[in-house]
Image (cartoon, rainbow, N blue to C red):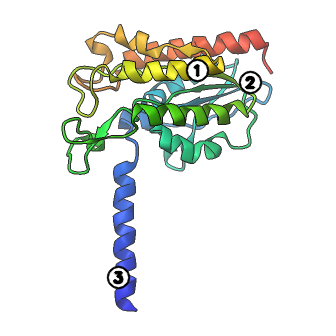
Amino acid sequence: MRNLFLVLILVAGVEAVRAADAAPYTPPADAKGDWSFTPDPTLPNVLLIGDSISIGYTRLVRAKLAGKANVFRPMRAQGPDNCGDTSIGLERIDLWLGERKWDVIHFNWGLWDLCYRNPASKNQGNRDKAGGKLSTPLDAYERNLEKLVARLKTTGARLVWASTTLVPEGEAGRFVGDDEKYNAVAARVMQRHGIPTNDLFALTRSFAGQHFIREGDVHFTSQGYARLAGQVASAIESIIGAKGGR
């Protein structure tokens, strides 16, 4: 009995380590601070679904749309939830949508799908494009997106797709050019469903070095996030303006 108990503890410990390794990474600077706010019931509700890039611009978008919309994102007990790849999206989408009536959903998956990971890698998130395994092949990415879009459409919200941001030279777990391949697949899916695209890839492709947190990193400085937030807020405002609020 004691041996069985020890085995169960060991298994639980291994599973905890695996869960920690699989947890989508978010730069500490983007996750820290107060994420709470008091929504105004008279304003439209906007949900931002995305990876750590969207975490970096969420609060800036909220500030830009203050008095015009309530801006939410998926949250965990300890802070904002990084929505990871499309497989994580399929597992958690119902939890993220909850019971709230959404007027606009601005969403993205891709940067985690096109990443190669290796458990032996010491890079953040076990990134390893030389010896790692691709998170989500293109065909699976398309199938997953189709399922996610079908679920999002059941909410009745106006949907806006955000293209995957740029993969810079030197990124440890991602190949330059894969961003365009995954964006092309996503564009087909969105076209089939009549969903407009907010082209964050084109925006970030124009960024200079000071917009990236460091060379070869997909994350951005405050300057970069400010520009992303401006484009995201404008895309959302054009929709809620056309709807005339709630």
Question: Considering depth in this image, is 215 or 174 the residue closer to the camera?
Answer: 174
Q: In which quarter of the image is residue 13?
A: bottom left
Crowd tier of the residue under label 1, counting other residues whose Cα lies within 10 Å: few below 14, some 14–19, many 20 or above: some
Q: Estimate the spatial distance between the alpha carbons at disc 2 and disc 1, rounded to whole Å.
A: 23 Å
Crowd tier of the residue under label 2, counting other residues whose Cα lies within 10 Å: few below 14, some 14–19, many 20 or above: many
**Label 3 sits on residue:** 6
Judge whether residue 71 can be spotted in this image.
yes
Q: Position of residue 68 (x, y in %)?
A: 70, 17
Asked if 1 appears above or below 30 in the picture, the reply is below
Residue at 33% x, 23% y is 178
Asked if 245 appears above or below 86 in the picture, the reply is above
Residue at 80% x, 21% y is 246
Q: In which quarter of the image is residue 127?
A: top left
**Lower position in the chain sequence, tag 2 or tag 1:** 2
Q: Where is residue 213 in the image (x, y as percent from the top left)?
A: 29, 24
Three-letter amino acid code of the residue under disc 1: Met
> Mark 1 against mark 3, which lies toward the viewer?
1
| Relative to 159, 16 lies left or right | left
Q: Estimate the spatial distance between the alpha carbons at disc 3 and disc 2, rounded to whole Å.
A: 52 Å
**Lower position in the chain sequence, tag 1 or tag 3:** 3
**Do residues under tags 2 and 1 come within 8 Å of each other at their CB atoms?**
no
Three-letter amino acid code of the residue under disc 2: Pro
Residue at 39% x, 37% y is 26
Q: In which quarter of the image is residue 156?
A: top right
Three-letter amino acid code of the residue under disc 3: Leu
| Relative to 104, 246 lies left or right | right
Residue at 43% x, 28% y is 53
**Label 2 sits on residue:** 44
Q: Which numbered tag is attached to residue 190?
A: 1
Q: Is mark 2 on a helix, strand or loop?
A: loop
> How many badges with numbers are in the image?
3
> Mark 2 against mark 1, which lies toward the viewer?
1
